[in-house]
Image (cartoon, helix red, strand yellow):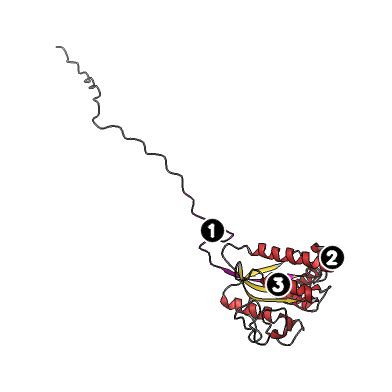
Amino acid sequence: MNTPTFRNPRPAPPQPSSRPSPTPPPPPRPAVPEPQPNPQGEEDAGPITFGIQIRLADALPEGGIEGWRAEIEDAVAKENLEEVEVRRRLARRIEQELNAGHGNCWLRQPEIADAVAECIRASHGRRYQIRAWAVVPNRVQAVVTVLQGVDVMALVRQWKATTSRDAAQRLDVDPREFWDRGAFVRPCRDETDVQYRIRDVEFLPVNSGLCQRPRDWRWSSAHLVPGEKPNGAPGGNPGPPPGRRPPGA
């Protein structure tokens, strides 16, 4: 008897699929970068108020700041105080030395002080608003609100370049030796800080021993001529001497 042989059925030929093959997804779009703020001052940025100090090239002894810093750091280390105390003590020491009147004090000459004051006030109300200013024999201090798009450092450089050329002609000196190369420019934290700095600036002649009242100093926004308003800073009354500042001011 023959045994039947079983064979695997031949597979059916593949039938065309009624569904089309899926289309591969398109490559992802490149990410669009978020708009970044313009460091020079974008349109939606508000004005900023700065405290500014510019001193003459010889207003402080050469190497004085480095030496004072080393002394203060040693003292602070022995007292086990924080680093912020170094900055506070150094700032006080620099202020004391500036008030001592080192150097030639070229800004003591009325015609040079007048020229510097006029330069500072020249663009008030257009490029910036002067909140307070004072010219004393060895330095200039100001509180300035910079309008949108104004570079405050470029403004300071312009003040220095213009006034140094004029002073150099009067004094027969190199204009590069008139102002110190640096400048102190610090933004104010808030309106309270602005008011502290305004009072500091307008009491600068008093603290320097040049007059008894801010209104008596001719080269200052606090100066009052009978029947006139303060120069350069509309509505800027000097007020009482500033009290103790909050920490870090």
* 128 to 2, vertically: above or below: below
Residue placed most toward the observer, 214 or 24: 214
Q: Please tell me whether mark 2 sits on a helix, a strand or a loop.
A: loop
Q: Mark 2 packing: few (<14 Cα in 10 Å), some, or many (20+)?
A: few
Distance from label 2 to label 3 (Cα)? 21 Å
Q: Mark 3 packing: few (<14 Cα in 10 Å), some, or many (20+)?
A: some
Q: Which residue bears the numbered disc 2?
A: 173
- Residue type at the position of mark 3: Glu
- Residue type at the position of mark 2: Val
Q: To which quarter of the image does residue 237 belong?
A: bottom right
Q: Earlier in the sequence, mark 1 or mark 3?
A: 1
Distance from label 1 to label 3 (Cα)? 34 Å
Q: Which residues are magenta?
A: 31-54
Please tell me whether residue 51 belongs to the stretch shown in magenta: yes
In the image, 7: left or right of 41?
left
Which of the labelled discs sits on residue 118, or is there none? 3
Q: Earlier in the sequence, mark 2 or mark 1?
A: 1
